[in-house]
């Protein structure tokens, strides 16, 4: 899954794809580089980010989604708003990625029950403006699994078939770097209930900190090799997908794992 943030302020690529034409070209480029799905978002979720209005969000994403769909690119819409999800699914998006798993907008799960597209439910505890204060867990792996399953219950109670659900531990969302590493290390616990799992580690702060020199985190565009290393490890554990900014190297990593697996 290629990341396309049509925002001025995303932590990883804010401002780069705010112009629709540039965003569309980049989405097509990521698809040609091996992204099976392009995930279009119009609202930054970086720690501390303030919310944008629904109309601004729609204005950013709608033309990009429509153009990519017209070009034959499978598109997922990364939004916490039912209104935006609805407009984008109507424009041809084939998946909804709600980082709040329906918690931010009470209309989201009811809306999703009326359509048939797959839905990503990500572990989320609160808006970006406050999420760094919510990173307290008794046992991060068990707590994330339990809280995600509560969201699965809420979704299925609304009439969303469990076959449509993809789970995501939400790396970096109310998580410290240590929490992120624990979730990756104990992925088998998350995988155990057999929902497809999506992982979004790409260029995140914990990779910058891992690769820091003299206390200075590695810059954003120096984190793609570490991202592809995580892709390889995740592919070897049968995750359903990885959400990445630079799909070519992650695609290569998946090809390597697939070739190795073909031997046995
Ligand atoms: N991370 C970001 C945004 N959307 N969606 C899912 N499902 N999983 C994630 O980990 C995730 C997401 C924030 O990262 P970005 O600013 O690089 O898009």
Image (cartoon, helix red, strand yellow):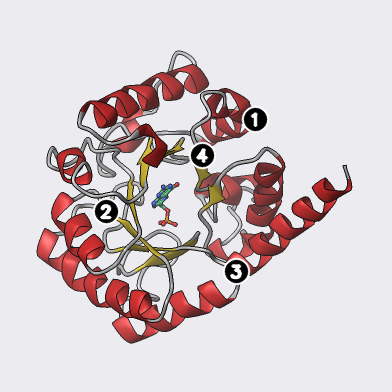
Residue pictured at 30% horizontal, 67% vertical: 7
In which quadrant of the rendered image does the C terminus lie?
Answer: top right
Question: Which residue does the numbered mark 4 point to in the structure image?
Answer: 197
Q: Position of residue 165 (x, y in %)?
A: 39, 39
Question: Which residue does the numbered mark 3 point to in the structure image?
Answer: 34
Where disc 2 sits, the SS reads loop
Which of the two discs, 2 and 1, labels the residue nearer the N terminus? 2
Question: Which residue does the numbered mark 2 point to in the structure image?
Answer: 79
- Which dot, 2 or 1, sits closer to the camera? 2
Which of the two discs, 3 and 2, labels the residue nearer the N terminus? 3
Question: Which residue does the numbered mark 1 point to in the structure image?
Answer: 185
Where disc 4 sits, the SS reads loop
Which of the two discs, 1 and 4, labels the residue nearer the N terminus? 1
Q: Position of residue 61 (x, y in %)?
A: 26, 69
- Which dot, 1 or 4, sits closer to the camera? 4
| Crowd band around label 4 with a 10 angstrom C-alpha radius: few (<14), some (14–19), many (20+) | many
Q: CA distance from mark 2 to mark 1?
A: 28 Å
Q: Position of residue 148 (x, y in %)?
A: 38, 27
Which of the pair 248/195 is nearer the observer?
Answer: 195
Residue pictured at 45% horizontal, 61% vertical: 12
Label 2, ligand 1: CB separation under 8 Å: no
- Which dot, 3 or 1, sits closer to the camera? 3
Which of the pair 233/158 is nearer the observer?
Answer: 158
- Which residue is most to the top? 138
Label 1, ligand 1: CB separation under 8 Å: no
């Amino acid at each position: 899954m290629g990341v396309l943030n049509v925002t001025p302020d995303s932590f990883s690529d804010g401002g780069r794809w705010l112009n629709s034409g540039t965003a569309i070209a980049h989405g097509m480029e990521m698809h040609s580089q091996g992204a099976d799905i392009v995930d279009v978002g119009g609202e930054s979720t970086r720690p501390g980010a303030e919310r944008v209005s629904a109309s601004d969000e729609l204005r950013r994403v709608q033309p990009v989604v429509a153009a990519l769909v017209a070009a034959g690119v499978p598109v997922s819409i990364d939004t916490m708003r039912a209104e935006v999800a609805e407009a984008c699914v109507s424009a041809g998006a084939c998946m909804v990625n709600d980082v709040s798993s329906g918690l931010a907008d009470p209309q989201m799960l009811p809306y999703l029950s009326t359509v048939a597209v797959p839905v990503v439910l990500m572990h989320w505890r609160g808006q970006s403006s406050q999420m760094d204060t919510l990173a307290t867990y008794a046992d991060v792996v068990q707590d994330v699994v339990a809280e995600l399953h509560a969201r699965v219950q809420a979704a299925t109670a609304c009439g969303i078939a469990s076959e449509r659900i993809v789970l995501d531990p939400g790396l970096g969302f109310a998580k410290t770097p240590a929490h992120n590493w624990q979730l990756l290390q104990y992925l088998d616990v998350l995988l155990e209930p057999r929902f497809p799992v999506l992982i979004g580690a790409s260029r995140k702060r914990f990779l910058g900190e891992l690769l820091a020199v003299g206390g200075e985190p590695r810059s954003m565009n120096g984190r793609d090799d570490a991202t592809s290393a995580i892709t390889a490890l995740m592919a070897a554990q049968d995750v359903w997908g990885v959400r990445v900014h630079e799909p070519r190297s992650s695609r290569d990593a998946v090809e390597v794992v697939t070739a190795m697996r073909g031997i046995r």
